[in-house]
């Protein structure tokens, strides 16, 4: 048996060990709690709601829906006079930003208090385009609405854009997953966000 | 409960497969260790290629973005 064969076997064994730990232990839940950003709700100039996903028929994803509701409750609590909804369209359907704005209007947010950004495809593009829009309105303090894992990357981008960022986290997924499927999904999502964070750092965006 | 079912199911099917292999197909139980070694080797190779693929993709995206 060569040294490389032995090394590959150890890597394979580590892979199986990681899979079993992710599926059958509280590891993903602990990782979720460890890397989750906390909320710091303050009065601000605007509420910025980052995009998640929308179906072609205009159905919002769970992430998108909870972020929208969170923004509406913050607005109705008088935390900021303006709400910015972000989110593109999918397969020619309505944009996520427009669907969210329509929902917010039905929940009592005045149309003149809402802004939309329906073109940004990435978090960085959202920070650049929404940042430009808000700077033109002399906005400096923002309540940023996104999930607790995405907040670290998104908050750093907006801070770098010159804003004072107050995190308003909201999660559609639980950090107390009980089934192997839910834990594996959580583990995959966490790895995806950590990979994105690493990519943004390497690319010099943060 | 789900975890227990999965573990029991895996144990039972593994035992049945071992029985079929050693009695039905007359394979030597000692060959199992060699097969497990090959399995780990293949899995390790998959992980190495996956990591290299992801790293190469990252570099390509970074290069094209600059």
Image (cartoon, coloured by chain):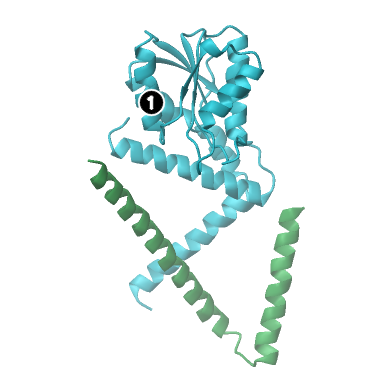
Chain colours: A cyan, B green
Residue behind mark 1 = A127
Residue depicted at x 48% and y 59% = A14
The quarter of the picture where the N terminus of chain A appears is bottom left
Dot 1 crowding, Cα within 10 Å, few <14, some 14–19, many 20+ = many
Q: Circle 1 — which element?
A: helix
- The answer for which chain carries disc 1 is A
The quarter of the picture where the C terminus of chain A appears is top left
Residue depicted at x 46% and y 8% = A45
Q: Name the side, left or right, on which A74 lies relative to A200.
A: right
Q: Name the side, left or right, on which B17 lies relative to A54.
A: right
Q: Residue furthest front?
A: A92
Residue depicted at x 54% and y 38% = A93
Q: Name the side, left or right, on which A185 lies relative to A133.
A: right
Compared to residue B36, the image places residue B55 above or below, namely above
Residue depicted at x 71% and y 76% = B15
Compared to residue A205, the image places residue A142 above or below, namely above
Compared to residue A28, the image places residue A6 above or below, namely below
Say if residue A157 shows up in the picture: no
Percent coordinates x, y for residue A64 in the rendering: 57, 31
Say if residue A77 shows up in the picture: yes
| Callout count | 1
Percent coordinates x, y for residue A123 in the rendering: 41, 32
Q: Quadrant of residue B3?
A: bottom right
Percent coordinates x, y for residue B43 in the rendering: 47, 67
Percent coordinates x, y for residue B2 in the rendering: 74, 54
| A132 vs A45, nearest the viewer | A132
């Amino acid at each position: 048996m060569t040294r490389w064969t032995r090394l590959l076997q150890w890597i394979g064994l580590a892979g199986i060990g990681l899979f079993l730990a992710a599926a059958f232990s509280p590891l993903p839940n602990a990782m979720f709690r460890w890397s989750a950003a906390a909320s710091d709700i303050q009065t601000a100039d605007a509420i910025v709601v980052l995009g998640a996903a929308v179906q072609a028929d205009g159905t919002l994803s769970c992430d998108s829906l909870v972020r929208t509701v969170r923004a509406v409750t913050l607005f109705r609590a008088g935390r900021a006079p303006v709400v910015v909804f972000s989110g593109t369209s999918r397969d020619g359907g309505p944009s996520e930003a427009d669907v969210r704005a329509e929902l917010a209007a039905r929940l009592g947010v005045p149309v003149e208090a809402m802004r939309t950004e329906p073109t940004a495809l990435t978090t960085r593009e959202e920070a650049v385009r929404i940042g430009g829009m808000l700077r033109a309105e002399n906005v400096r303090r923002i309540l940023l609405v996104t999930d607790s894992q995405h907040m670290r990357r998104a908050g750093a981008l907006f801070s770098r854009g010159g804003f004072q960022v107050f995190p308003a986290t909201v999660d559609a997924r639980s950090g107390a997953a009980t089934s192997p499927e839910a834990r594996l999904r959580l583990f995959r999502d966490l790895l995806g966000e950590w990979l994105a964070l690493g990519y943004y750092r390497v690319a010099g965006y943060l | 409960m789900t975890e227990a079912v999965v573990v029991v199911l895996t144990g039972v099917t593994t035992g049945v497969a071992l029985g079929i292999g050693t009695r039905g197909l007359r394979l030597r139980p000692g060959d199992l260790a060699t097969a497990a070694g090959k399995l780990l080797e293949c899995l390790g190779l998959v992980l190495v290629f996956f990591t290299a693929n992801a790293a190469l993709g990252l570099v390509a995206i970074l290069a094209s973005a600059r």
